[in-house]
Image (cartoon, rainbow, N blue to C red):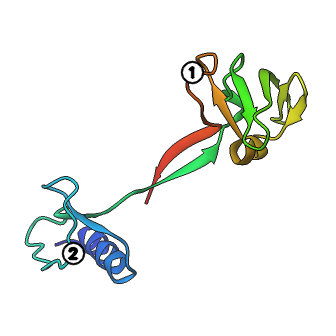
Amino acid sequence: MNIKQTKEVIRVMQAFVDGKEVLLKRTPNVTADDPYWNWGDDTEMYRIKSIAKLRPWTADEVPLGAWIKSKHDNSKSLILEVDKIGQIWVNSGPISREAALENHEHSTDKGVTWLPCGVMEEGK
């Protein structure tokens, strides 16, 4: 096992010690609850389960022309544009992308489906 492989083994084992979920790579979605750490020549036998995280849209990802509604009062507005500083402009005024993520949902199918105002990213 070379230094790079050893570092990866340590990273996975430390994640297990820290309480993160470790999965067997060869059997998708099988948790290694009590791993026996038989790495042999295969440093990719285990992996740390990814944790998805929702982040705000970038200015380029804002779906212009979509509907946006408040989670608090269900008021709806049309997304008109994104300005130079990245604020989302709707018919009722500007909304920051962070506020959109936290307080609003959006629909690109005229209100049939409402989704978060952000992008789901896989984390490590």
Mark 1 or mark 2: which comes first in sequence?
Answer: 2
Q: Amino acid at mark 1?
A: Val
Residue at 16% across, 63% down: 45
Rendered view: 45 above or below 35: above
Rendered view: 110 above or below 85: above
Name the side, left or right, on which 12 lies relative to 93: left
Residue 101: tell me if it is visible. Answer: yes
* Residue 33 badge: 2
Depth order, front residue of 106/119: 106
Residue at the right extreme, as displayed = 93
Q: Where in the figure is residue 82, as x and y percent of width and height? A: 80, 26
Q: Where in the figure is residue 93, as x and y percent of width and height? A: 91, 29
Instruction: From the image, state whether disc 1 or disc 2 is nearer to you.
Output: 1
Do the residues under discs 1 and 2 have CB atoms within 8 angstroms?
A: no
Residue corresponding to mark 1: 112
Hey, which quadrant is residue 69 in on the image?
top right
Rendered view: 76 above or below 19: above
Q: Amino acid at mark 2?
A: Asp
Q: Alpha carbon of mark 1 to alpha carbon of mark 2: how far?
A: 41 Å
Residue at 78% across, 20% down: 78
Hey, which quadrant is residue 60 in on the image?
top right
Mark 1 lies on a secondary structure that is loop
Residue 61: tell me if it is visible. Answer: no
Q: Where in the figure is residue 44, as x and y percent of width and height? A: 19, 61
Mark 1 residue crowding within 10 angstroms, few (<14) / some (14–19) / many (20+): few
Depth order, front residue of 110/97: 110
Residue at 19% across, 57% down: 25
